[in-house]
Image (cartoon, helix red, strand yellow):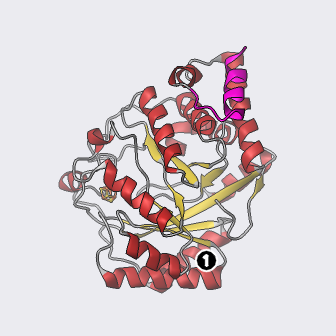
Amino acid sequence: MSITQEIRELINENIEIPDDILMSIFEFSGANLMEIFSLALELKEKYTGKKINFCSIVSAKTGICSEDCSFCGQSSVAGKKEKKIKVNPLMSVSEIVEAAKIAKKNGANEFSIVTSGTRISDKTELKTIAEAVKTIKNEIGITPCASLGLMEYEDLLFLKECGLEIFHHNIETNSDFFKSICSTHSFEDNIKTVKSARKAGLKVCSGVIIGMGESRFDRIKMAKEIKELEVDNIPINFLNPIKGTPLENIEPLTPMECLKTIAMFRIVNPKKNILAQGGREYNLRQLQPLALMSGANGLLLGNYLLTSGRNPELDLELINDLGFEANNLINSPI
Ligand code: SF4
């Protein structure tokens, strides 16, 4: 039996796919490569349909953070080296709402309010975000999401009651590798936030960054740990090394390695929304369209936190050219 057939049968029987089979995905090449991408595409279409979801973010608060996440341009480590990091306090309600209007106009169906820092501990800031969420939900017609760092259950419940639908909090990497990229908070802190968001009744978007020096096995472990969390959306980010960070000189993954990782994530999490997010231009280069042919069913539209994304019109054109459709359903479960 071929490996793809074996994987298909394991998925159909709801049996966990052994690590050695997942590792073999990375060895596919040439004509065989299409077999594994074809399987990932088949699973994507079977479980999530043909529509492609688009989300968009606003960096509502920027500035140096006390945490030392080695991939982040706003970390305490980057801040010591790079004096030019822009520090902006939290945007006003009207500024956040204006950004949501633009995201909607560009074709996004989900809009995330993102803030730098460990957490939102200032209740005035929490109220501003809650007010923006209410307005976005009631007046703009785009699904409101927030990414606010580590959060307590009570604050998440408050945001849910104000209309928040999705909470985003990446686990970043797996439980073993996490210590190599951050020492100021723990992997368990991230898990606690993700679980609190689920307990508050929010949909959860939680994913990873690949290309930070982890092994293939580390990526398999990420995909399996995410599966255990039963989140709704899994964003896969590709490291775009930022000057001043400890990872500034790391070699990027090859585009093919990124695509095989997307396929592996789809195979481990066949029914979830898998999104190709930040850093796809830098890492996938000319192969960006293949992200949607190797298992992803969503893209981050427009700019990222500290780096520019590509023109949203190009992404809309891309999905048309591939024969997919943009998901314009408001409040769709991305
Ligand atoms: S907690 Fe967030 S803002 Fe702070 S260093 Fe880590 S990733 Fe950057």
Query: Residue 102: percent from the left, percent from the top?
Result: 60, 73
User: Picture quarter containing residue 329?
Assistant: bottom right
Task: Magenta stretch: give its range.
Answer: 1-17
Tell me if 106 is positioned left or right of 150 in this view: right
Q: Residue furthest toward the top?
A: 1
Which of 54 and 284 lies nearest the eye of the viewer? 54
Element type where label 1 sits in the image: helix
Above or below: residue 125 compared with residue 86: below
Q: 163 and 317: which one is in front?
A: 163
Q: How many discs appear? A: 1
The magenta stretch spans residue 149: no
* 292 is higher (above) or lower (below) than 108: above
The correct choice, above or below, for 279 with respect to 34 in the image is below
Which residue is rendered at x = 59% and y = 36% of the image? 268
Q: Amino acid at mark 1?
A: Lys
Specify whether tag 1 is near ligand 1 (CB below 8 Å): no
Q: Quadrant of the N terminus?
A: top right
Q: Residue at x 40, y 47 (%)?
A: 172
Identify the residue shown where x is 37% and y is 57%: 192
Can you say whether 118 is above or below 264 in the image? below
Query: Among all residues in the image, which is located at the extreme right?
Result: 323
Q: Residue 118: horizontal and vertical position, in percent?
A: 29, 63
Q: Is residue 12 magenta?
A: yes
Residue 157 on image: x %, y %: 46, 75
In the image shown, does 218 or 278 lie closer to the viewer?
218
- Which residue is drawn at the image coordinates 45% and 27% (left, top)? 216
**Residue beneath disc 1:** 101
Is residue 124 at all visible to an observer of this figure?
Answer: yes
Can the viewer see residue 277? no
For ligand 1, the image quadrant comes to bottom left
